[in-house]
Structures are given as structure tokens and as C-alpha cells.
Amino acid sequence: MNRLDQVVTKDVCRADQQAVEQRIGQVEAGLAHLRGDHKQMAERTGLQRREDREHAAAARRLVLSSFVAPLLVMVLQPGLASKGSAS
């Protein structure tokens, strides 16, 4: 007789199964949301890295040109001055 008291009815089993399925659906929806957030974060990080690389390249070009331009003027100035005085 004690075993009959422990038997779960079909309705209770069905309700429990529905609750489990609902919880699984909620977890799956949460995971999908997290995947979307992760994808957006990865895209933003990639964009930020590209922008950082572009800024670094621009800074390198600026530094290089700030050293090369005066040297070029110093090298070309005597030649241009001699041509101007020869005329």
C-alpha cells in the first residue's frame, strides 16, 4: 500500500515535464541572447582594433614625415641654391 502512495499521477508527471520543457526553453532563449551580445561585443572589439591600427599608422606616417621632410629640404637646399645663383 505504501507503494501506491508514492506513485505519481499522469497529470503531475505531465505538469512536471511541461515545467522542465519551459525552463529549457528559457535557458535556450537566454543562451541565444548571450550569443548575440557576444557577437556584438566581438564586432565592436574588431572595429576598435582596426581603428587603433589606422590611428597608429597615421601617427607613424606623421612622425616619419616630420623627420624626413626637414632632411630632404637640407639635402636639396644647396643644390637649389647653386642652380639659382648660376642663372
Image: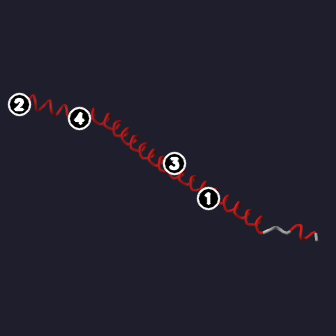
Q: Residue furthest left?
A: 87
Q: Residue at x 67, y 62 (%)?
A: 21
Going by the numbered disc 3, the residue's amino acid type is Met
Using the image, tell me which numbered label, if any, was put on residue 28: 1
The quarter of the rendered structure image containing the N terminus is bottom right
Task: Name the element at disc 1.
Answer: helix
Indicate left or right for 31 with 76 as reference.
Answer: right
> Which of marks 3 and 2 precedes in the sequence?
3
Residue 16 against residue 70 in the figure, above or below: below
Using the image, tell me which numbered label, if any, was put on residue 75: 4
Residue 2 against residue 65 in the figure, above or below: below
> Which of marks 1 and 4 precedes in the sequence?
1
The quarter of the rendered structure image containing the C terminus is top left
For the residue pair 53 and 12, the one nearer the viewer reads as 12
Q: Residue at x 89, y 67 (%)?
A: 5
Other residues around mark 2 within 10 Å, as few (<14) / some (14–19) / many (≥20): few
Q: Residue at x 77, y 69 (%)?
A: 10
- Whole-angstrom CA distance, mark 1 to mark 2, is 85 Å
- Whole-angstrom CA distance, mark 3 to mark 4, is 51 Å
Residue where numbered disc 2 is placed: 87
Using the image, tell me which numbered label, if any, was put on residue 41: 3
Task: Name the element at disc 3.
Answer: helix
x%, y% of residue 24? 66, 60
For the residue pair 21 and 59, the one nearer the viewer reads as 21
Task: Name the element at disc 4.
Answer: helix
Q: Quadrant of residue 61?
A: top left
Going by the numbered disc 4, the residue's amino acid type is Val
